[in-house]
Amino acid sequence: MKALVIRDYPKGVIGFFVLFYTVGVLGMIYEPTRRFFMSLTPLALLLSSFALALFHRSVFGKKEALVFAAIVIFGYLVEVVGVNTGKIFGVYAYGATLGLKAWDTPFMIGLNWLLLVYTSAAMVQHFNVPRYLQPVVASLLMLGYDFILEPIAPRIDMWEWANDAAPLENFIAWGLVAYIFHTILLLSRIQIKNPLAIAIFILQVVFFAHLYFLPTL
């Protein structure tokens, strides 16, 4: 497997995002600023996605544009169906934190699917995971992320579950949708080389893990 070479990374940008997510944690745990920082969640998602786009070093042609757009659109649509029927992930409802909605589903959730698929795919490709295992390993990374996120999401008004906890079907469906998206990437032979991608994925995991273990939320 390829070693992680720190000098290949945009250190200044990574340092900015370390500070950015650290301030986000502090803002979330301090009750007087919590609502304000929760309202910044869509901005944080857009900023992270914009930075990833700037550091995208792979080929970006029509194929890549179509596949990435498809992940955003179908990621959003599967959430629309899920939240309005309760038949995919379970019975849940989105709060206000992710911003503007249509059909009770925030527009940002489609971009969030792409960000997670993109960064987890970049990780397995960087470490030279065998191609036939890449969809499985990348989907497991996303599933691990979801395990960390689910307990904290209701506390910061991202979404809430009918029975106050994510059901098993949510994790099964999440992993399956992630696997489908990663399989599409594999079959499309899209290579993702981005020196910022691994850092963004890890920072998001650490961000939600900190919120989970801090008792003030």
Image: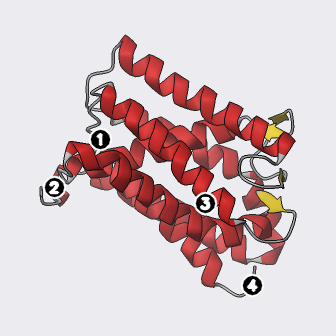
Give the amino acid type for the residue marked by disc 4 in the picture. Answer: Thr
Label 2 SS: helix
- Residue sitting farthest toward the bottom: 215
Please give the residue where the numbered disc 1 appears in the rendered image: 194
Q: Which mark is residue 216?
A: 4
Q: Do tag 1 and tag 3 residues touch (Cβ < 8 Å)?
A: no
Closer to the N terminus: mark 2 or mark 3? Answer: 2
Label 4 SS: loop
Disc 1 crowd, CA 10 A, few/some/many (<14, 14-19, 20+): many
Please give the residue where the numbered disc 3 appears in the rendered image: 171
Cα distance in 3D space between marks 4 and 1: 35 Å
Q: Position of residue 79 (x, y in %)?
A: 72, 40
Task: Look at the image and tell me whether residue 10 can be seen.
Answer: no
User: Residue at left 71%, top 77%?
Assistant: 29
Q: Which mark is residue 203?
A: none
Closer to the N terminus: mark 3 or mark 4? Answer: 3
Give the amino acid type for the residue marked by disc 2 in the picture. Answer: Arg
Cα distance in 3D space between marks 3 and 4: 26 Å
- Residue sitting farthest toward the left: 2
Please give the residue where the numbered disc 2 appears in the rendered image: 7
